[in-house]
Image (tube, helix red, strand yellow):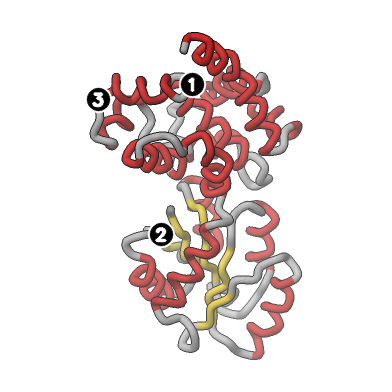
Amino acid sequence: MLVLAAVPVIQFHKLRRAAAPRFPVVYARDWADALAVIRARPVELAAVDPQLEGSASAHEIERLRMLFPSLPLIVYTALSPATGAVLLALGQTGIRAVVFTRIDDHPARLREVLAHEEARSASRQLLDQLAAVLAPLPSELRWVVEEVLRAPADLQTVQQVAARARVDRRTFERWFARLGLPSPRHFLAAARVLYAHRLLQDPGFTVEDVAQRLGYAQTKTLQLHARAYLGLTAGEMRLTLEPRQALERIAQGFAPQRQAHASAS
């Protein structure tokens, strides 16, 4: 899971050392850079300092919160009279995770906060939705499928996923058939549509941003998949479906396959 560090350089290095190897960390030198990184890369968690550009201000963090409400934010800053007033303002936006430099930013504390906030990330919520479906898979295969759901741009084909799980493609497909699931190709494509739907709930993402983040070579492929699995364009699914409804609609589309499998057995 990629973590954005929109903090001064010293805090970035502390965060990167504490987060390794579980959480890779990418640095943003200013708020414009932070916004560009969130839109272009699969950032799922951000550590931010209201003093990033000098004087303490809640404005840019509040803007990130407004544009990307699904992105968990950790305030990582120095405790001072100036930041105290800012923290009160940010608390009104729902930000609760705060770490103070030189007070409680030892590695164990930073790792604890990162792990706690990871549970609120878009990919973790998607995994929680699909946990019951994936549970019967062999552990090695389940871990790789979960890895795909966390970073769908990294492993995009059935062959790549099977190779990462150290099984051949036919074994991969047999496991899915045994569980009454759709083919791995359809399952992975549908999962990417669900992930795209989650990201599109944030007003800061365009359809093009989401397509890029999920590794689609062309935005029209995302549109085709959205129509195939949800019956809607990407723009329509952003406006008309909640995450639970999107999952239910995809599950209904796969139901005939499960029923056919059950009848055959």
Classed neighbour count for the residue bearing mark 3: other residues with Cα under 10 Å, few (<14), some (14–19), many (≥20): some
Tell me which corner region of the image, top left, top right, bottom left or bottom right, holds residue 95: bottom right
Reply above or below: 233 against 134: above
Q: At x 41% / y 71%, what residue is drawn?
A: 15
The residue that label 3 is drawn on is 168
The mark closer to the camera, 1 or 2, is: 1
Determine whether, in the image, residue 127 is placed left or right of residue 140. right
Classed neighbour count for the residue bearing mark 1: other residues with Cα under 10 Å, few (<14), some (14–19), many (≥20): some
Q: Where does residue 214 sit, x and y in percent of width and height?
A: 47, 36
Q: Residue farthest to the front?
A: 265
Reply above or below: 29 against 136: below
The residue that label 1 is drawn on is 180
Compare marks 1 and 2 and give the one earlier in the sequence. Answer: 2
The residue that label 2 is drawn on is 26
Q: CA distance from mark 1 to mark 2?
A: 40 Å
Q: Where does residue 211 sit, x and y in percent of width and height?
A: 52, 33
The mark closer to the camera, 3 or 2, is: 3
Q: Amino acid at mark 2?
A: Val
Reply above or below: 174 against 216: above
